[in-house]
Image (cartoon, helix red, strand yellow):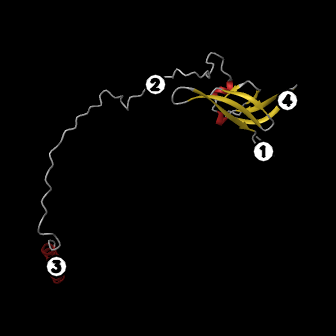
């Protein structure tokens, strides 16, 4: 047993000596690629204070309410009238799905996002921009909307809802 321990101890000590040699070589050679001279830091420029003189200008980060101009335009929505059910939905979420003729009047069938169907005729309102229906045909529903521009003035805009193509074979 003693014969076996002595050769193992010699091998273990021999392995330790080679690690020390590698470490010494690394330390000796580690500074070979480093520059010998370090460039001096640039001179520090003196600080020049800035005097802000824009205190009388409006603050760009403060929200301001748009004040309507005293324009000669007579366009303005009637805010006193009773709102209709289809004015609660954005125009993009409504869809024209058909028409019905009662007597001589043509009615459009409009579908809401909740899948309710409403009958509307010329003069009814729909959409969130005070849109009033001005014409109904078999293929589309035309309306005039009142929108407010950046200056606070009201402008008229034409819009339309086109008839959706029918889904034949659909079981919905």
Q: Which residue is mark 4?
A: 101
Q: Quadrant of residue 170?
A: top right
Q: CA distance from mark 3 to mark 4?
A: 102 Å
Closer to the observer: label 3 or label 4?
4
- The reply to whether dot 1 and dot 3 touch (C-beta < 8 Å) is no
The structure residue drawn at horizontal position 13% and vertical position 62%, both measured from the top left corner, is 39
Q: Which residue is mark 1?
A: 167
Q: Report crowding for label 2: few under 14, some 14 to 19, many 20 or more residues within 10 A (C-alpha).
A: few
The first of marks 3 and 4 along the sequence is: 3
Closer to the observer: label 2 or label 3?
2
Vertical comparison of 21 with 96: above or below: below
Q: CA distance from mark 4 to mark 2?
A: 47 Å
For the N terminus, the image quarter is: bottom left
- The reply to whether dot 2 and dot 3 touch (C-beta < 8 Å) is no
Q: Judging from the image, what secondary structure is the residue with disc 3 in?
A: helix
- The reply to whether dot 1 and dot 2 touch (C-beta < 8 Å) is no
Camera-nearest residue between 153 and 15: 153
The first of marks 1 and 3 along the sequence is: 3
Q: Judging from the image, what secondary structure is the residue with disc 4 in?
A: strand
Q: Is residue 91 visible?
A: yes
Q: Report crowding for label 1: few under 14, some 14 to 19, many 20 or more residues within 10 A (C-alpha).
A: few
Q: Which residue is mark 2?
A: 65
- The reply to whether dot 4 and dot 2 touch (C-beta < 8 Å) is no
Vertical comparison of 137 with 34: above or below: above
Camera-nearest residue between 74 and 90: 74
């Amino acid at each position: 047993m003693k014969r076996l321990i002595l050769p193992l101890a010699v091998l273990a000590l021999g392995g330790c000596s080679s690690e020390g040699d590698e470490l010494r070589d690394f330390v000796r050679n580690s500074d070979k690629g480093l520059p010998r001279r370090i460039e001096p830091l640039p001179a520090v420029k003196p600080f020049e204070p800035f005097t802000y003189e824009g205190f009388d200008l409006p603050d760009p980060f403060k929200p301001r309410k748009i004040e309507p101009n005293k324009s000669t335009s007579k366009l303005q929505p009637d805010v006193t009238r009773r709102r209709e059910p289809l004015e609660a939905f954005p125009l993009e979420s409504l869809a024209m799905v058909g028409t019905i003729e009662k007597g001589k009047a043509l009615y459009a069938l409009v579908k809401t996002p909740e899948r309710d169907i409403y009958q509307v005729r010329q003069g009814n309102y729909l959409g969130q921009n005070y849109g009033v229906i001005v014409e109904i045909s078999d293929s589309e529903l035309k309306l005039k909307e009142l929108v407010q521009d950046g200056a606070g003035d009201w402008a008229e805009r034409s819009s339309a809802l086109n008839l959706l193509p029918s889904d034949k074979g659909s079981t919905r």
